[in-house]
Each structure stands twice: as C-alpha cells, then as structure tokens.
Amino acid sequence: MQFDYIIVGQGLCGTFLSWNLMKAGKKVLVIDEAQPSTSTKVASGVINPVTGRRIVRTWEIEKLLPFAWNTYTEFGNELGVSLVSKCNILNFHPTPQMEMAFRDRMPEETEYLKLPEDQESWRTYFNFPFSIGEIDPCLLIELHGMLDGWRKKLKESNALLAARFDWTECQIEKDQVTYQDYLAQKIIFCEGAEGIDNRYFNLLPYSRNKGEAIIASIPDLPRNHIYKQGLSLVPWHDGLWWIGSTHEWNFTDLMPSVEFRKNTQTQLYHWLKLPFELVDHLASERPTNMERRPFAGLHPIHSSVGLFNGMGTKGCSLAPYFAKQFADFLINQTPMEPLVDIDRFKKILSR
C-alpha cells in the first residue's frame, strides 16, 4: 500500500504532524503501539506563559499561546470534544524570597502577572504563610481526549498500524521507505523518549529526564484554577487532579518512586485543608534535550528520513506551532525556524 508519509509515534508530535499533513491532503500511516504511560499521557496539559524562579516569559510565547488556542480549538471541533480552556495559576509563594521575586517582576510583566483579589478567602482551602501571585492567562489542554479522539480517527481512515515499530522490517532508500508491505516517500520519527536511541538521530544532544506525577481525588477543591506551591495541582480528566511533577536527571528506572509519593502526601497534608485521596502514581521519561529547542527536519544524508521530537516539558505549546511549520516545509519547502531545524546539526548527523 502506498503512502506519502509514515509517522512513527502518536504522542503530541505524531498527532499534530499527521493531522496537519492529512489536512493538506497527504496520505499518512501512523505506526504506534498503545502504551499506558507515555510522556504525553502523564503530562499535565498546562501551557504557562512565564516559568522558572526568575518568572520569565517562555521562548516565543507571544506567538505560541494564541496559535495553541486556535489550533486546539480547531482540532477539538473536528473531533467533537473540547480540548482547550483558559485558566489561571494561583502561585502560593513558599518563601519570602519567592514572594519578593514575583512582586519585583510584576511591573515588567503586566500582561501575565498580578495579585488575586481577596487572598484571605483561600484560607478556607489552604494553609499558606505568604501571599499569592496570579499568572493569567494560561491554557489547559485535555490531552487524553485529543490523543484518544485522533487515534479513533486514524483507525477509521485506515491510517493506523497499532504495533511497535520494528527496524528489521524497515528498508530506507534514497527516494522511498518500505515498512512491511507499506511504501512511502518519507518516514518521520516522532518517538518521544525512545528517539534518544534512534539510529539516524542518536548523535543529537538529547538528555534523559524522568518525571513523576500523582493523581488524586480532591472533591471540594474548586476546579477553575491551577494551584502551585512547588508542586502544581492541575484539574485532570474524570474529575481528578494531577499533582507534580519531578525533574530527575539521574535515575536508574522509570518506576514511580516511594519517596515522591511520600513527599507529595506530606506536602498535601500541610498545604491542603481539604480531604484528599491518592488514586494513582505515574512516571515517564520526557524527550528533552540540552538546547531546550525542538528537533524538526530531514536527515542531511538520508533525505527520506525525518524527525519531529525533543519538545521536553513544553510540548503542549511547541508541538502545534512547529508541526504546522514542519508540515509546510515537507509539502512546500517553506523554511523552518533555524533554532528548530535539525539542519543546525548537519555536521554531527553527517558523520
């Protein structure tokens, strides 16, 4: 069977790239084995315009935030589900230094930072020794609805091979790719963390990063905000809360750790005044890299092989924008953002 593109992986990157290519009339086959704990399925779904201890704008957020809103809205309309909502983050400052840093940034970042009204009303729900800062607007993405809905669409279009990709069944040639009985002009790898070991792209500056999150039931906590005090409490699907996450650079396995569960439970007992129940504990590896910029493009020697990966912790904001840009590049040879185009690693990948 003949396709224009084979895409390996149906996380955020594979979903958005296949969606954009199919919207443009291209015939696509997605190869993906369903797994319960991929980095996308474990992610919170939050797009936060300012991050870090210095509370600075994330890279290109002025373009990424409105593009994400429009794209998730359009995608959700096509799937018949609501994928995106606007919300805010109530930042409970854990130290006087963090409180001062937030207030010092407010005059310079009036678009996103402010102080919430009637802070004392939150003492009904939380214990907090310092004030609360507000980050607004943020976006909250319903990732499970998107991934499940698009997977169903792919099946209905005979565009999904629900199996693990096997290199022994793949033959790469100059002008085409053969996988089992499928032919395509190009194969694009959107494998997430597994891409670190991809034989064509393993020289890229990936870095391994493990994240953990707790899923909890907190029935009496208002669900129209995200709450943060070191940990983030994020409204999740099925009326539950996502609580996390960690960023571990040195780890020996991808199993949920007893230490994280205990620390999270202890913090919740001190912070929350409401009853809660921990119902699940998730862990996964993120597709991060040392540059903190995505990887998109074609291999400099093997032009029938491409890559769209490396979103790290910003996948919800980065993937929609750069999937469209990469699809335009593949179809019309439209130039991509130089800081994203893997042509910047041409010498390394040509070894």
Image (tube, grey):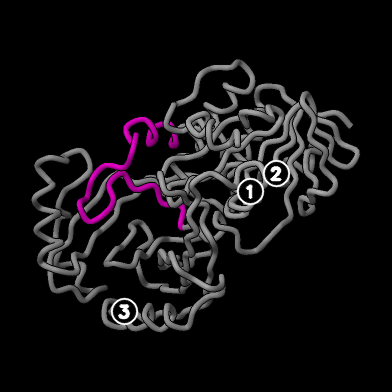
Q: Which badge, 2 or 1, comes first in the chain's sequence? A: 2
Q: Which badge, 2 or 3, comes first in the chain's sequence? A: 2
Q: As displayed, is residue 235 above or below residue 32?
A: below
Total labels: the figure holds 3
Tell me the quadrant of the picture where the C terminus can be found: top right
Badge 3: how crowded within 10 Å, few (<14), some, or many (20+)? Answer: few
Instruction: Give whichever of 226, 287 is nearer the camera.
Output: 287
Q: Which residue is mark 2?
A: 8
Q: Which residue is mark 3?
A: 267
Q: Residue at x 31, y 62 (%)?
A: 227
Q: Which residues are magenta?
A: 44-69
Instruction: Give whichever of 333, 103 is nearer the camera.
Output: 333
Asked if the stretch drawn in magenta spans residue 141, the answer is: no
Asked if the stretch drawn in magenta spans residue 46, the answer is: yes
Q: Residue at x 34, y 48 (%)?
A: 48
Do labels 2 and 1 touch, CB within 8 Å? yes
Residue 55 placed where, x, y %?
22, 50
Mark 1: which amino acid? Glu
Residue 105 placed where, x, y %?
13, 47
Do labels 3 and 1 touch, CB within 8 Å? no
Give the left or right position of residue 198, taking residue 288 as reference. right
Q: Residue at x 21, y 53 (%)?
A: 134
Q: Which residue is mark 1?
A: 191
